[in-house]
Image: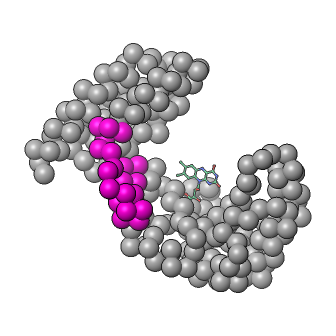
Amino acid sequence: MKEPDLVAECINSMVNSCKLPVTAKTRIGFDDIEDFDYLNQFIHKMHNAGTNTFILHARKAMLTGLSPKQNLNIPKLNYDMVYKIKKENPRLEIIINGGITKIEEINNHLDHCDGVMIGRSIYQNPYSLVEIEKNIFKTKNCPTREQVAEKLLEYLDKEVKLGTKVNHIMRHTVGLYHGQIGSKDWKRYLSDNMMARDSDFQKAKHIMTIVQNNEKANQVSS
Ligand SMILES: Cc1cc2nc3c(=O)[nH]c(=O)nc-3n(C[C@H](O)[C@H](O)[C@H](O)COP(=O)(O)O)c2cc1C
């Protein structure tokens, strides 16, 4: 963001060398710059270079003094800046990001922007995507966690045959039972069997036993 010409050059090269649409994700500012005109001009430059979709993380980045993790929380969110960019550039696709976790918040943002990107909240609790499917997209038949796990195993089987490591997939499923009975068992099973570099697909097959036990325990308690 400090070097808009360089970013535009990179975008232009990508646009010219691939057929997929190129999107851009950026913060709204950096260090002591959090300025509408600066951001707007930066976006115009990227748009002229060939991108039409912008994901705006609604906080600036502190390039010195804060770790990447602190940079996800400490600079203040400024959603209004993102809304203003959309208002000023109605033809651009503007997707808002940063600190969004609840359905109500998503709906509010959708009044001002074209889309919402959610990072940490989905990573910690991936099954919350079902709430989004139901409430935002009005999807009727959403899969249970058990069905998700079955699909996951099918996918894992296919990928392992192509050479993907079991742990590269399974380490991202730690949150499947977030907030549910059995969350600890799920995490323990993953960490004991599926997190090592040489984890074996045969062990993954037993995962459905954990899943079925968790499903039963959650049905009994509800
Ligand atoms: C597991 C994980 C991986 C991420 N990887 C990237 C990345 O490769 N590039 C990027 O720009 N942001 C990345 N992010 C940041 C998110 O896209 C997002 O901007 C940030 O987490 C703020 O949104 P949130 O408050 O919804 O988490 C990642 C976030 C998470 C949780």
Question: Which residue: 59% across, 20% down?
Answer: 163
Q: Quadrant of residue 61?
A: bottom right
Location of the N terminus by quadrant is bottom right
**Number of residue marks:** 0
Q: Is residue 135 left or right of residue 94?
A: left
Question: Which residue: 76% across, 77% down?
Answer: 40
Q: Quadrant of residue 53?
A: bottom right
Is residue 90 at least partly visible in the picture? yes
The magenta segment is: 125-148
Q: How is the image coloured?
A: one colour
Q: Is residue 30 left or right of residue 151?
A: right
Ligand 1 location (quadrant): bottom right
Question: Which residue: 32% across, 51% down?
Answer: 141
Looking at the picture, does residue 162 appear above or below residue 71? above
**Residue 22 percent location from the top left of the image:** 74, 55
**Residue 79 percent location from the top left of the image:** 57, 77
Q: Is residue 186 left or right of residue 78?
A: left
Between residue 215 and residue 189, name the one nearer to us. Answer: 215
**Residue 126 percent location from the top left of the image:** 41, 49
Looking at the picture, does residue 208 appear above or below residue 27? above
Task: Check if residue 72 falls in the magenta segment.
Answer: no
Looking at the picture, does residue 125 appear above or below residue 85? above
**Residue 92 percent location from the top left of the image:** 70, 72
Is residue 63 at least partly visible in the picture? no
Q: Quadrant of residue 195?
A: top left
- Residue farthest to the front? 140
